[in-house]
Each structure stands twice: as C-alpha cells, then as structure tokens.
Amino acid sequence: MLTDHFPWLTVIVLLPLVAAFLIPILPGKDGKSVRLYTLGVAIAEFALMCFTFWQHYDPSITTFQLADNYAWIPQLGLNWSVSVDGLSVPLVLLAGFVTTLAIFAAWQVDLKPKLFYFLMLVLYSAQIGVFVAQDILLLFILWEVELVPVYLLISIWGGKKRQYAATKFLMYTALASVFILVAGLGMAFYGDNFTFDIAALSLKNYPLGLELWLYAGLLIAFGVKLAIFPFHTWLPAAHGEASAPVSMILAGVLLKMGGYGLIRLNLGILHDAHVYFAPFLATIGVVNIIYGGLASFGQSNMKRRLAYSSVSHMGFVLLGIASFTDLGISGALLQMISHGLIASVLFFLAGVTYDRSHTLSLDEMGGIAQVMPKSLLCSQ
Amino acid sequence: MASLALPGMSGFAGELSVFIGVSSSEVYSSTFRYVTMILAAVGLILTPIYLLSMLRQMFYGSGIAPACVLPSANFGSTFSNSLNSDNQFGTPLNDQDAVCFGTNCVLPDDSIFGDARPREVFIAACFIVSIVAIGLYPKMATQLYDVKTVAVNAQLRDSYTQIAQGKQNLYAGIFSTPKIAASITKADVASTVGMLK
C-alpha cells in the first residue's frame, strides 16, 4: 500500500541509520572527519524534523498524521506503519534536540571514534522510530534495536564499573521488553481480526480480566524504562557509568520512552484497566518522588545523585498520568519534556566537570568555582 | 538549577500542572489527594536541598581545607618552589600541568584544567534557552499536544464513568479486581507514610 504523499516520517526515521552505514567508508582514522560528518547528519535530521512538523503537522486534530504504511513482512502481518500525533511530536523533537546536542557534546572520542558515532546514529534512528511507530510489533522491534547501541555505548566507553552497569541495563530492559511482545501478541490475537495496528487495537473490546493482565505486563515493561520504584535499580548504575553524551541520551530520551509507552498503550488502549490501576500508579509515583529524593542524599557520586533525582522527577509523570484530569496528563507530558532538557544539561555539565577533575566524587571536588566561573554560571 | 523547579523554568510549569491536575481530580477521595499532595510536596522540598548541596560541594568545597595550593597564582617561577614546599606526598611532581583540584591532588598529568570552552557554553546555552523558554511560555510546548491529551483523557473519563455506574456487572468478571486494587492502594499509602516517619 503506497501513500500519496512524500514519506516524510520514513525518511526521518531512516536517515541516521542509512548515514550510519556510510561511516565505515569515510576516510581518516582520527575521528575528526567522522565527527563532523555525524554532527552534520544530526543537524540535518533535526532540521528536517522541524521543517516537516512546521509544514505538515496540524496540532489541532487528534488523528494520526503524516502516515506512512507499507507492508513489510505480510506473512507475519508486520507493517512499516509510522505516523505522528500530539503525543509523538514533542517527544520526537525532544529526541532530535537532545541527541544532536549529545553528538556535539561527544567531541573528544579517542577510543574507536567510528564505532562510537555509528552507534550514536543507530540510536538516533531507533529512538525516533519508537516514538512514531504505530504498529505494536514494529514498536517492539525498534525498542529492542535501541537497546543494542546503548549497551555497547555503556560497556565500551563507560566508567570503571561499565561492564556491570551495561549488563544490568541490558538484562533489565531486555527482560522487561518481552512483556511488550507478550502483551502485543495477546492484543493482536484477541477477537476476530488479527492486527498489530495500535489504532485498531484500541477499538477492540477486551474483557476486564485480560485487560488487567495486559496492563500489568505493559506497566512492567514501561515501568522499567521509566524507572518506577521497584524497577529503578538499573538507572543509577547505567547513568553513573555511561559517558556524558550517553547519559544525556539515557536521561533525556530513553526514560521518556517509558512514559510515552504508558500514555500511548496503557492509557490509549486499556482504558478500563487504567481505572483500576490509577490509584496504584499515583501511589507508586509518590513513592518514586520521595524515595528518589531521599536516596539522592546518600550519593557521593555526582552522576548517581543526578540519576536518583531523575527517579524522583519521573514520579511526577506517573502522578500526572494517574490524575484523570486534562491538566494532569498534559503536565505529565510537559514534565517529561522539561526533565528531558534539564537532566540532559545536568549530565552534560557533570561530564564537563569530569573532563577537568577526573573525579565524580563530590567529596574530592571543592572550590572549582575559583577556576570554572563560567561553568558555575551555566549550572545556575 | 532548573530542576529545582524555580518559577520561569520548565520544571516548574510541569510540576505545577501535575499538582493542580491531581488535586483537582474528583475521581479520588479527598484524603487520598491530600496525602498524595503532601508527600509529593515533601519530595519537591528535598530536590533543592540535595541539588544545592551538590553545587556547594562542587563549586565551593566541602569545608575541608584544600590539601594543595591552587595553581592560579603559582604558575611561573614560583610554581615548582611552592610545590616542593607543600608537597605532602613525598614524591616529586612534574612541574608541568600538576594542577591541584580541591582536595584531589592525584590527577593525571595530562589533565587540562580550564573553564568551559565555547563549544560547551554553546551546548549548555541551547538547553538553558529552551528550558527558560518553555518555563516562561509553556504553551509553546503544550500547544503541540494539548488536543491529543484531552482526547486521551476523555476516553479515560468515559471508562471511569461506565465502571463507576455499572459496578455490579463489571465486578462479576474473572477477578475481584477492584478489591485488589483498593487494598494495594491503602497498604501502599500506609507504607509510604510509615517510610516518611
């Protein structure tokens, strides 16, 4: 099935991926040409995104726009189905903004620069893909694709305990994402028509028992990503050990995938179950806020302290999602966007400080305002 | 600093809408809303404490006197002299780039210690401009998605009203779920309160 307009979104999703595969044939081994090339691609991608949404996106309607729909593997019923609506657009823009600046922040990569920038571009594609996929199987695939570069980025360019952190991240998120597949298959096979399309799934009428199980499964999957209370332990490890650009993407974009998934699938498809789960979500949200704040005190490592503050801020997203009011849900999305920006810049500044001091321990720092007045100004 | 949720920053707008959203939600009992709001407010108060204390430790030291002399005044001819006299480690330090940093004196020799470079200032400025822009004028962000979140919420309200009206039929489902959900909620609220004490 071909669409009559130019496939903007497909181009946006695939551009960094295609560009990534050109990196091995670039000349130069010191990484200078590669980083210019990567930054160029990232800026072009962000500009294309802004142009597309400026020209072709109408925020005043709720239906899916800019839809591209191609049969990919018809035997499986898998479609390349991408489109945007009000939930996707801000997060796609956030992902583009943060990732572009993260690539700009990763200016001095001495170790295997080509592989580093290759993985960054693959990650770029996968993130955007998750936010625009409207086919639950495609969403699952892109969700998995995004794990691989993050795992490698942490385990090769991370800090001292990088292997531990990377493996923990991979185990947690890969195991949790199985729940997306299971819940997705459950929804797809339920009823008369077999479909993976998220819009069609939301029209099905599930029995309450099934809906609650599906909701619980998806809540675990997205809860791990959003770092809600019992499943948050991968986050301080991963954020603490990843290098600054990767932490920026982890905190700025990847956490938001959990919140996006909750709003898109749990709230969008399983409304009835949400009514039962909402008080639980609000409670967990409050636990997150308090627990993250208290745990943050105990951290002497700057990045781990920031990571626990992310846990705390994600509690507000849960609280907003559970609120049943227009303002609450809108606030949850606004909180995701603002946290994406704030956490990214904090992790970036942590990286800047680390570049100079070679320590993340707060006890060993002190008095750097005397040598870094501009950085002090920035962080305020 | 922006995550302190000062007015004018985007964190403030987000957290304020969540606060008002939850507290004006008539779905929950007022007790539940009060407890939630109070606890969330406690969490909000914690944020500036730990972030500001982090900044203080980072930028102004943790109150411990620096173990080595800050280099700025000591470069040049006096540099090696002052190092020799103040050297606590008993090992000769290289006289180039042996920069002291707070109480941490064991830096790699190649660490270049300078203030933020233009590239870094640019990246930070990009973020800060957008944070302040969204904070001062949240509509810039919310207009992109408001219609959609209202639509999502309308569906949820429908389900809620239906379930609230037809309780008997729905509760005869496979699980006695409402009871489970209710008991979890109470237990968790209680444990949260207990944790705070």
Image: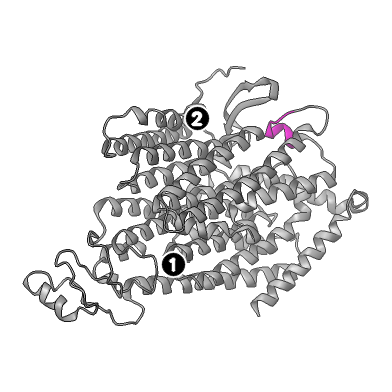
Query: Residue A254 placed where, x, y %?
Result: 53, 48
- Label 2: how many Cα within 10 Å (few below 14, some 14–19, many 20+): few
Q: What residue did someone put label 1 on?
A: A301
The one of A176 and A349 positioned closer to us in this rendering? A176
Query: Residue A126 placed where, x, y %?
Result: 51, 37
Q: Is residue A179 above or below residue A364?
A: above
Quarter where residue A121 is shown: top left
Q: Which residues are magenta?
A: A195-202
Query: Residue A253 placed where, x, y %?
Result: 50, 48
Q: What residue did someone put label 2 on?
A: A56
Amino acid carrying mark 1 in the image:
Asn
Tell me, yes or no, whether the highlighted magenta stretch contains residue A200.
Answer: yes
Helix, strand or loop status at disc 1 = loop
Amino acid carrying mark 2 in the image:
His
Res B5 seen here: no
Q: Residue at x 47, y 47 (%)?
A: B140
Total numbered circles: 2
Query: Residue A309 placed where, x, y %?
Result: 51, 64
Res A174 seen here: yes
Q: Main secondary structure of the magenta part?
A: helix
- Label 1: how many Cα within 10 Å (few below 14, some 14–19, many 20+): some
Tell me, yes or no, whether the highlighted magenta stretch contains residue B58.
Answer: no
Q: Residue at x 79, y 27 (%)?
A: A193
